């Protein structure tokens, strides 16, 4: 009974906080612009600051005794970062008021960690491979693991090549055709054996041992994917044994899980010899050059914008003295950062280079092992590209997180009463949203339930659109909650993922953790488990007293790993107990069971499956007041639609639109060979221009006709709908 009372209190908190504070005239407003000047007063659009730091420092001077909100308005444009923007306990609101960082127009201001690569020349005309120098300020060796051409992620050169089935597989591939099969692991499990036929054609093309050490083996081990940097190899009787570099060998021997067994799928990546398919690139850290084979629509790259990420964490919010990569200082939990809002912004182009420097051997949801100097291991989490620690009442609303190199948004620990609502998470290398401690040394092996300040509590994650996460690190998930009390994860839409959709809980077994009273409700989860094994649409690990999973809609989960059966709509794993699981609609799944109970229970279960009324699905997912956020990606905004849920975009139309900005005009080009419509619309949905064509076409609009700063270019046909934002900087 006590859990039900506490749950009611939690719901009252959510009702009070989801709408935010009551609007009132701000106490002060500061403006910044990429073309501004920090010598300006910053209090008008005509004389804005230039940097976030200048605006932050201006806020610090007046936020000690606030009589209203303070706004920092980002005028349209791209705010290119060469370092992390940091906020601490001096930077939040006071007296119940907030400091609000917001774009002047929705999605018109981008905070970017990207660097533009230009000066492309032909490297190999017969193979259509181009090259350019990446010797730029802010880019250090070994370079970068992602590259984007006109906003589209490129493929880190690999062998075998990818043959995606649809847009959700574009960077993941087909498990059956795009990966080789491992013969075995060596006896000490510090190396692996493959068929020589799979390596004979490229090994002679590696010019030296230094270049061999750049090559990585990506091995799918059940629910995770290792990235192992090669050190050397031996040949015997048609078999090649590869050994990773020394520290990775030791971690492999010490890690019993995920299990390493014969038959696991693998590929190699990161060599010039692998650049043989359109969209592939290779970064040479010795010559500081990048090599790229353009897609057909990109031509000679003269009209393309090519961006590579240079900054790992764009925004870090934590008290002074805290450091994401250093030792934890729990004394700083007494002075949390409070009352900051981010709204209508784009966070994009971030990196995470640790896998290139030390390999990547994850255990669960990209939580990975680190070898310490004394030979022991410690667990770390994938880096947070926007990172919070010891934060209370922080709000992210209607933002876009895209083209991220690790986990897009991380609420690590000591985070209370924060709201993540109505955001888009797209094209993310690791997890979309992560919250709560996992295996940090201070809580290993389980969280301390007595330390309420350290434990995440009452965070709300609702109405977010999470699409195509885990694009590099395929054991990642859409939304992850570790040790948390009273988290409310509701009305999100999560789809197009290689592994599980929503995961919560940590530390398997019945020894008890601080995870409790969490609610997973009304989410729309579909098209997940597209590559990996042993997961589900909603996955739970460990004890969860007082937690509820109800009224979720789960559909379209197929068996993409034919050799396995461990993929489930609802998965209660290894000690999951104390939960109520009921009224979840499950349909169109190629799974052996609706709920997988793996050494779990007792739990209370009600009706789950296709017997649950379909009204659950119509009420699930993003609520109407936030569905318009899907327009940013050109996706349908009607919510659950049983008639259209199987529609997939043909791979041949993955890049149908090219936008070129010239001095007098905007040129929109398509490469679609059947009837389609090209529209330019304002942010309010009104149409500026609309033309219909029957074959590849080009539309030219003069800049004078486009009087605002923010538009969307939409291309629509019977089988595709693509929307791209068009931001004009005046």
Image: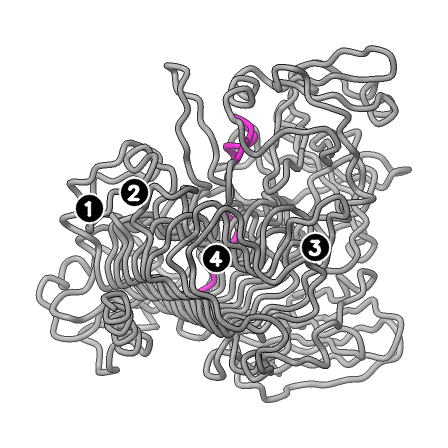
Q: Say above or below: 730 vs 303.
A: below
Q: Secondary structure at mark 1?
A: loop
Image mark count: 4
Work out whether mark 4 precedes mark 2 in sequence or the reverse, and give the earlier one.
Answer: 2
- Residue drawn where x is 60% and y is 31% of the image: 259
Picture disc at residue 447: 2
Residue 409 appears in the figure: no
| Of 472 and 679, the residue lying toward us | 472
For marks 3 and 2, give the CA distance: 49 Å
Q: Position of residue 151 (x, y in %)?
A: 63, 57
Furthest residue to the left? Answer: 65
* Residue corresponding to mark 4: 479
Q: Say above or below: 196 vs 367.
A: above
* Mark nearer the viewer, 1 or 4: 1
* Mark nearer the viewer, 3 or 2: 2
Asked if the residue under mark 1 is in contact with the one under mark 2, i.e. CB atoms within 8 Å, the reply is yes
- Would you call the spot at circle 1 few (<14 residues within 10 Å), some (14-19), or many (20 or more)? few
* Mark nearer the viewer, 3 or 4: 4
Q: Position of residue 22 (x, y in %)?
A: 24, 82
**From which residue to which does the magenta span run?**
344-362
Picture disc at residue 304: 3
Q: Secondary structure at mark 2?
A: loop
């Amino acid at each position: 009974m006590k859990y039900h009372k506490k749950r009611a209190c939690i719901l009252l908190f959510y009702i009070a906080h989801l709408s935010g504070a009551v609007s009132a005239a701000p106490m002060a407003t500061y403006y910044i612009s990429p073309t501004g000047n920090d010598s300006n007063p910053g209090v008008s659009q005509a004389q804005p600051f230039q940097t976030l730091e200048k605006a932050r420092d201006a806020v610090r001077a007046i936020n000690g005794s606030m009589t209203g909100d303070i706004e920092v308005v980002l005028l349209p444009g791209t705010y290119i970062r060469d370092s992390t923007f940091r906020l601490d306990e001096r930077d939040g609101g006071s007296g119940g008021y907030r400091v609000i960082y917001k774009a002047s127009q929705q999605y018109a201001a981008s905070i970017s960690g990207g660097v533009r690569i230009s000066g492309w020349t032909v490297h190999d005309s017969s193979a259509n491979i181009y090259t350019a120098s990446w010797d730029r300020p802010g880019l250090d060796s070994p370079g970068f693991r992602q590259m984007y051409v006109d906003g589209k992620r490129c493929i880190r050169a690999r062998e075998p090549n990818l043959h995606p089935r649809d847009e959700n597989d574009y960077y993941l591939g087909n498990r059956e055709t795009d990966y080789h099969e491992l013969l075995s692991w060596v006896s000490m499990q510090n190396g692996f054996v493959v068929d020589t036929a799979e390596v004979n054609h490229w090994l002679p093309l590696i010019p030296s041992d230094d270049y061999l050490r750049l090559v990585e083996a990506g091995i799918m081990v059940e629910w995770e994917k290792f990235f192992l940097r090669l050190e050397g190899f031996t040949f015997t009787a048609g078999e090649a044994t590869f050994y990773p570099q020394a520290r990775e060998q030791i971690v492999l021997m010490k890690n019993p899980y995920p299990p390493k067994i014969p038959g696991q799928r693998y590929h190699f990546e990161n060599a010039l010899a692998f650049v043989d398919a359109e969209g592939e690139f290779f970064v040479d850290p010795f010559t500081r050059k990048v090599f790229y084979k353009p897609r057909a629509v990109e031509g000679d790259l003269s009209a393309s914008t090519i961006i590579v990420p240079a900054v790992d964490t764009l925004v870090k919010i934590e008290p002074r003295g805290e450091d994401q990569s250093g030792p934890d200082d729990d004394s700083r939990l007494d002075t949390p950062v409070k009352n900051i809002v981010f709204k209508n912004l784009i966070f994009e182009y971030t990196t995470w280079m640790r896998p290139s420097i030390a390999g990547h051997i994850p255990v669960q949801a990209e939580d990975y092992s680190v070898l310490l100097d004394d030979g022991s291991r410690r667990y770390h989490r994938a880096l947070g590209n926007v990172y919070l620690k010891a934060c209370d009442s922080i709000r992210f609303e209607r933002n876009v997180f895209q083209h991220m190199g690790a986990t897009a948004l991380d609420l690590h620990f000591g985070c209370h009463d924060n709201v993540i609502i109505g955001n888009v998470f797209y094209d993310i290398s690791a997890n979309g949203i992560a919250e709560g401690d996992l295996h940090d040394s201070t809580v290993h092996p389980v969280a301390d339930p007595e330390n309420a300040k350290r434990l995440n509590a009452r965070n709300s994650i609702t109405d977010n659109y999470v699409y195509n996460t885990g694009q590099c690190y395929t054991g990642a998930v859409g939304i992850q909650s570790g040790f948390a009390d009273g988290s409310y994860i509701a009305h999100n839409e999560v789809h197009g993922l290689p592994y599980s959709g929503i995961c919560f809980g940590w530390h398997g077994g019945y020894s008890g953790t601080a995870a409790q009273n969490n609610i997973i409700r009304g989410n729309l989860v579909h098209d997940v488990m597209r590559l990996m094994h042993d997961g589900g649409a909603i996955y739970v690990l460990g004890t969860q007293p007082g937690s509820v999973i109800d009224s979720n809609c789960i559909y379209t989960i197929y068996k993409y790993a034919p050799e396995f059966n461990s993929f489930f709509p609802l998965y209660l794993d290894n000690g999951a107990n104390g939960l109520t699981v009921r009224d979840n609609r499950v349909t169109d799944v190629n799974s052996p069971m609706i709920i997988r109970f793996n050494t779990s229970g007792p739990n209370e279960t009600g009706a789950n499956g296709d017997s649950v009324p379909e009204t659950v699905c119509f009420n699930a997912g993003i609520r109407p007041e936030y569905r318009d956020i899907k327009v940013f990606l050109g996706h349908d905004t009607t919510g659950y639609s049983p008639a259209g849920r199987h529609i997939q975009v043909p791979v041949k139309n993955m890049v149908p639109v090219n936008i070129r900005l010239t001095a007098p005009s905007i040129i929109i080009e398509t490469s679609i060979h059947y009837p389609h419509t090209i529209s330019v619309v304002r942010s309010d949905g009104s149409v500026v221009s609309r033309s219909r064509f029957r074959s590849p076409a080009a539309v030219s609009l003069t800049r004078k006709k486009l009087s605002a700063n923010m538009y969307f270019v939409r291309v629509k046909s019977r089988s595709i709908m693509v929307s791209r934002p068009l931001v004009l900087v005046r």
